[in-house]
Amino acid sequence: MHRVDNMPKRFRSIKENFQHIFRGTTSDVSRKIICGNFVNGNMGFAVSALYIKKYFDDNARIQSSEMIGNIRKSFSDMIEKSSWMDEASRKKAIEKAEAIDEKIGYPDYLAGDNMTQLETQYADYKFTSSYINNVLKLIQIKAKEEFQILRKTVDRKAWGFTAPTVVNAFYAPSKNQISIFWFSYLSSSIFLFIAFPAGILQMPFFDRDAPKYLNYGGIGVVVGHEITHGFDNSGRQFDKDGNRIPWWTKETVQEFNERKTCIVDQYSNFTVPNINMKANGNQTQGEDIADNGGLRESFFAYQKWAQANPNADKKLPGLSKYTPEQMFFINYAHTWCSKMTDSYAMNRVLSDVHSLGQFRVIGPTSNFVEFDRVFKCQPGQGNSRVKKCIVW
């Protein structure tokens, strides 16, 4: 199944038939897209060097860095105000949040004219055979690269393996590391680190010329989400250096578990209407905690920015009836708009640690008193919960 995509059509068709049933797909991805994804996935930094020159600039990088700083400060403030943490645990949590090392957009060497480092990185990438044999050679090259890591000292400031063209996000607790690309995990080193590849710094997540309420409701919530992963049911077990050791008191852990249980129960009561299937709040709890925390952190950070920059954000044509704060939530919801087949939805509910898009919107907003205020909701009416589940 892993290599069949690299084989001739008569072999690929076997997997395609399986996918039609398993995911409910009715059409195949074009060969052009498959090949483009393959090159980007395996030689992403070479592709990125071209991508950055065409699409990315330092203004976006500077804006992103400022936003990340504001959201990190917002999270530290939330920890400071938390009523359920004891002083010792609270202090260590703030230290962990402040230990973040930011990686914004792309590694510096990709933006210059000196390609020596890039050429060295891809020195073994020489292909002269058939496609499948080239693929097998590439697998050998990748294996060699990974084995070489075992002999090298960990560079905590290094960019890592994430190419700037990727659009994704993950948290690696053993590194205390945050990177913005989707559903991949690396494991080595120990440091809290944020990498935001240039790929995600585009609409609907980010646009350098867009009003800040859109950017904070888009990439801002993603930033907050990944920061919060360091303090979810899994991330909280690792200290600021990525060591898996107890660093909270038992009393604080008990308080955390009570709040976590509220989230688990809430999401377990969500039903996917088209397949009449309950969500699994226990399976998705880490991502749900991160979604709730990320929304709150980014909103509070935007509020502070707006207070310091009154009237700086302009309303958008055709959307002038909405306030900037309402537009923050509207763009947040927009980022999770999706349509999927029943088969794919069932597959996601059974196996994915992320809630479906609609629950990633309904859950966090229903728990947030600021959402109630902004849209004049009464608790218990519409999307507003009376008993709000709040961890961070």
Image (cartoon, rainbow, N blue to C red):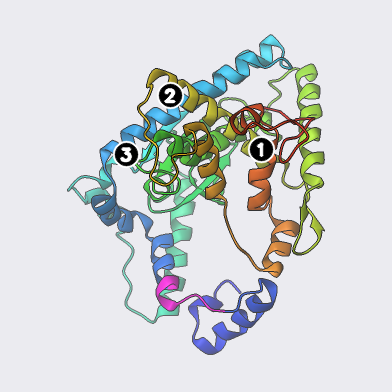
Estimate how packed mark 2 is, as few (under 14), some (14 to 19) or many (20 or more) residues with alpha carbons within 10 Å.
some
Numbered range of the magenta stretch? 27-34
Q: Amino acid at mark 2?
A: Ala
Element type where label 3 sits in the image: helix
N-terminal of the pair, mark 3 or mark 2, is 3
The circle on residue 306 is 2
Q: Position of residue 211 (x, y in %)?
A: 38, 36
Distance, label 2 to label 1, CA atoms, is 22 Å
Task: Report the residue at 67% width, 66% height from top.
Answer: 344
Q: Report the front residue among 225 and 360.
A: 360
Number of labelled discs? Answer: 3
Q: Position of residue 24 (x, y in %)?
A: 66, 74
Distance, label 3 to label 1, CA atoms, is 28 Å
Q: Amino acid at mark 3?
A: Ala
Q: Amino acid at mark 1?
A: Pro
Q: Residue furthest bottom?
A: 10
Estimate how packed mark 1 is, as few (under 14), some (14 to 19) or many (20 or more) residues with alpha carbons within 10 Å.
many
Q: Report the front residue among 129 and 115.
A: 115
Q: Are marks 3 and 2 in contact (CB under 8 Å)?
A: no
Q: Position of residue 276 (x, y in %)?
A: 81, 61
Distance, label 3 to label 2, CA atoms, is 19 Å
Task: Report the residue at 48% width, 44% height from top.
Answer: 180
271 sits left or right of 162 in the view: right
* Quarter of the view holding residue 388: top right
The circle on residue 60 is 3
Residue linked to disc 1: 364
Q: Report the front residue among 233 and 392.
A: 392
Q: Are marks 2 and 1 in contact (CB under 8 Å)?
A: no
